Image (tube, rainbow, N blue to C red):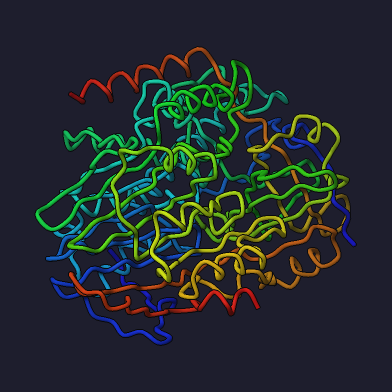
Amino acid sequence: MGPIDYGELDVVNGTERSPRDDEIELTLFGPGYGESMVLHLGNGVWVVVDSCVDSTGAPAALRYLERIGVDSAESVNVVFATHWHDDHIRGLVDILAAAPNADFCCASALCTSEFLGMVGALETGHFSVGGSGMRELHGVFSLLVDRGKEPIHAIANRMVYCNPDCEVWSLSPSDSVFQTFLKALHGLMPKEREAKNRVRDLSPNEAAVVLWVEAKGTSLLLGSDMERGGWSLILSDTTRPVGRASVFKVPHHGSGNAHVPEVWDSMVEKEAAAILAPWRRGGHALPTTQDAKRILNETTRAWITRSGSSKQLSFKHPNRTVEKTLRQGVVRLQRLPDSYHRIRLRRQFDSSDPWSVELFGDASHLSAYAA
Amino acid sequence: MAPFDQSTAAQWHDTAADENEYDVNTTLPISPGVSAANHEVERALAKRRLADSHLMDNSAAHGSSVSPLHEWNTEAESLIVDLPPRVTRRRRGATLHALQEWEGYVAEIRHDDVVARLTDITAGHRYESVEAIIPRSEIAERDAERMVEGSIFRWVIGIERSGKETVSRVSRIVFRDLPRMTQEDYRRGREWARSTMANWT
């Protein structure tokens, strides 16, 4: 690996050290290109949930772990892919390649012959420079075959990882969603003689994997991009783990279509720490100001990885001729965020103290975003 | 302004008369990154060189105006590549010097415009770094008719020299004729799925 420029990870009000063995940590990255988390489950055991990258294609999770002195090869036990939207899986192959002992867990629906058949058919002959999520998943499954490993299938209420100190459960997708997902796949797969375009995102994404983490008296709810319909199924399932989470990764970038009051009422502690990463496309941003205010009504302890994400990033080309051509044209351009920012939560096991919150880069309290 | 030349893919393909009409550039800057990422880029580069040489062979052998992409699709299925050859088109008496080249995909089609994400080919980026909102009026009718979410295009801004000392700035959005799904693709997908799942208990 070449030298790493940590400039984009400059600390605003946090300090860098790896967590102690008796500390649990959740760090959320975003955006960059997407959203990702790393989770320390104690005693040097780490898991990675989804992946996002910077403009060089380097995964945020790997850079962060290296920076705080954690050896990914030794310490990353599981890599989770909660769903296959591009903004959650870019760099996943690199993470798995750097963690040779890690297991890989994804929705059971992604481990079907139907889905893998689509991946296999579309990965080769793809003429896009950036490839697509298909290529990333093809790389992941091929790597698992090389290692003789089988993916862990996430379905509703399955314990997908455990050690003496902690358990990780998948709360979704349910059986009914599984069937819906397979039907939707048929709509995504190009028909014979249709162009091999980039596969669009599947929405609503009820096949997303919501994770429930329990570690020595501390519970966390990681909401992925789950939307309302999926949450209703989770809430109606009486066999799910009981308890209330003291940390909630707010689903789907805080969107109203993922907000279910009963989740806050029955699965999350009052004044829990809520964290989220924003999203933006075509002039539409998530969360909206209303979304942010709604979340702040549920808890005042809410943070977002980038406070200024509702503002557009102006684009200026370094070549004067190109810039002049662009300015005279009618196409509107804006830069996409090329560096990631992060929120780090830490707490000692068995502690009832509030989580310590450290903000890096442009991360801020959600009230600054709402303002 | 230098208006958008709403040339379509066909216009790009009509100059494949002989090998000498292409300046093939196989140099692609490699972004810093982790080793696996570099490996992937190197693999893609190798395939691009292979595709370039195949393209040269095709254009020389056929001496026709048939799209090179179609040639690949029908004649060289086994040589299907991850990256297209990057070429500077040179029509007789006209050259285009690309100053900026993006690959874009259509992320969202709206009533009056299209939201697209652009990857900077010139800078050798792996992922998109720019978002473009393109008025539908800027997209050629033929392209607009077949455009769907996920369609891939090239956007080139450059200097064109044509005729006698005529120099103009040009900006071209060209939707690409991508390979079509074939029964062979489906078969290969099923086979890959089968061989992958055969490793599972």
Residue located 16% across and 60% down the image:
A45
- Give the side of residue B68 with respect to residue A253, left or right: right
In the displayed orientation, state which residue is furthest to the left. Answer: A164
- Give the side of residue A170 with respect to residue A21, left or right: right
Relative vertical location of residue A42 with respect to residue A209 in this rendering, above or below: below
Quarter of the image holding residue B55?
top right
* Quadrant including the C terminus of chain A: bottom right
Kindly tell me whether residue B27 is visible in this rendering.
no
Relative vertical location of residue A22 with respect to residue A232 in this rendering, above or below: below
- Residue B183, horizontal then vertical, whole percent: 51, 12
Quarter of the image holding residue A240?
top left
Quarter of the image holding residue B170?
bottom right
Kindly tell me whether residue A215 is visible in this rendering.
yes
Residue located 65% across and 45% down the image:
B107
- Give the side of residue B114 with respect to residue A252, left or right: right
Relative vertical location of residue B96 with respect to residue B149 in this rendering, above or below: below
Residue located 62% across and 59% down the image:
A280
- Residue B133, horizontal then vertical, whole percent: 75, 54
- Residue A307, horizontal then vertical, whole percent: 57, 75
Front-most of residues A92 and B144:
A92
Front-most of residues A246 and A180:
A246
Residue located 52% across and 26% down the image:
A185
Q: How many marks?
A: 0
Front-most of residues B201 and A155:
A155
- Residue A270, horizontal then vertical, whole percent: 42, 67
Front-most of residues A358 and B70:
A358
Relative vertical location of residue B30 with respect to residue A19 in this rendering, above or below: above
* Quadrant including the N terminus of chain A: bottom left
